[in-house]
Amino acid sequence: MVGILVLMAVAVITFALTNAAIDPASAIAGDSASAQDIQTIRELYGFDRPLYMQFASWAQDMVAGDFGQSYRQRRPAIDVVLERLPVTMTLGLTAFLLALVVAIPLGIVAGLRPNSWIDRLALGFAVLGQAIPNFWFALMGMVIFSVNLQILPVSGSESWQNFVLPSIALAYYAVPTMMRLTRAGIIDVMQSDYIRTARAKGLRPAKIVLKHALRNAILPLVSVAAVQLGMMLGGSVVIETIFAMQGIGYLAWESITMSDPPVVQAIVLIVASFYVLLTFAADIINAWLDPRLRAR
């Protein structure tokens, strides 16, 4: 129910902002159209109606999967978005898995040895990761590995090599948050009574950490990871633009600059749906990891 309300709120805000920023009739008519042409299109498409009536018609079509026609490509906006979606999905999932592979082991090691040199090194890496903008990191990676060393492509999305630098740049900003949550969870859980009991029984340290401690330590991480994955899928505009990758992030930038509201609206609603589904999946996973949450 909450997810539906979120999507409704996103739909209202998206429709209001796109219509406030762009005159649909002028966008359809083009730059060379006269005032009379624009007025004719406004009446033909119903843009002269009150905004709430336009929204009601748009929302009804949107529920049926019809986001309207792209003003620039003259074909369904949803088809334009779905055509670019696989690139963004590949980039986002690759970056997400890379962030997990780096953040969780680093957080576990730092949490098991608080205030050690490893812990301080991990925290320093986290501070550095949050201080450096990912677009600067992406540009430096491009200069070093693409321009100077010439071992990776500069741009495009044709092969797996094209995804290496963008995935690293996109994952780089998510690693510090995930690592710090894992570290804090491990430190807290390792002081619990059931961990002391497991130690008293003589269980191996690796089994205590992986089987008993990690299950409860990563509960906060699951929720944050869902949000991070949503950000990677929906917030990759900068990275896709830098590397000229033909995903929905780059498409969003193109559609905004070319005044194509139906495509922008479709992208925003699809990304919002991803957020809702990922949050719901995180709640299910947390309930599976911690049975106490099922009774709430």
Image (cartoon, rainbow, N blue to C red):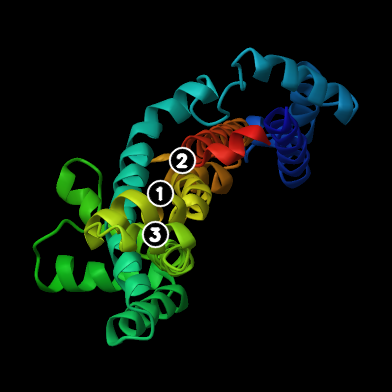
Q: Residue furthest right?
A: 50
SS for tag 1?
helix
Mark 1 vs mark 3, CA separation in Å? 16 Å
Q: Which mark sits nearer the N-terminus, 1 or 3?
A: 3
Q: Residue at x 38, y 27 (%)?
A: 83
Kindly identify the amino acid type of the residue bearing the numbered disc 2: Leu
Q: Return the residue nearer the eye: 214 or 61.
A: 214
Q: Residue at x 12, y 74 (%)?
A: 148
Res 82 quadrant in image: top left
Query: What residue is pinned by disc 1?
Result: 215
SS for tag 3?
helix
Q: Return the residue nearer the eye: 95 or 136.
A: 95
The spot of residue 186 in percent (x, y) is 41, 64
**Residue 106 against residue 225 in the figure, above or below:** below
Q: Residue at x 40, y 49 (%)?
A: 215
Kindly identify the amino acid type of the residue bearing the numbered disc 1: Arg
Query: What residue is pinned by disc 2?
Result: 289
Q: Which mark sits nearer the N-terminus, 2 or 3?
A: 3
Indicate left or right for 35 with 153 as reference. right
Contact? badges 1 and 3 (CB < 8 Å): no
The spot of residue 65 in percent (x, y) is 59, 16
Res 92 quadrant in image: top left
Indicate left or right for 149 with 41 as reference. left
Which label is found at residue 197? 3
Contact? badges 2 and 1 (CB < 8 Å): yes
Which label is found at residue 34? none
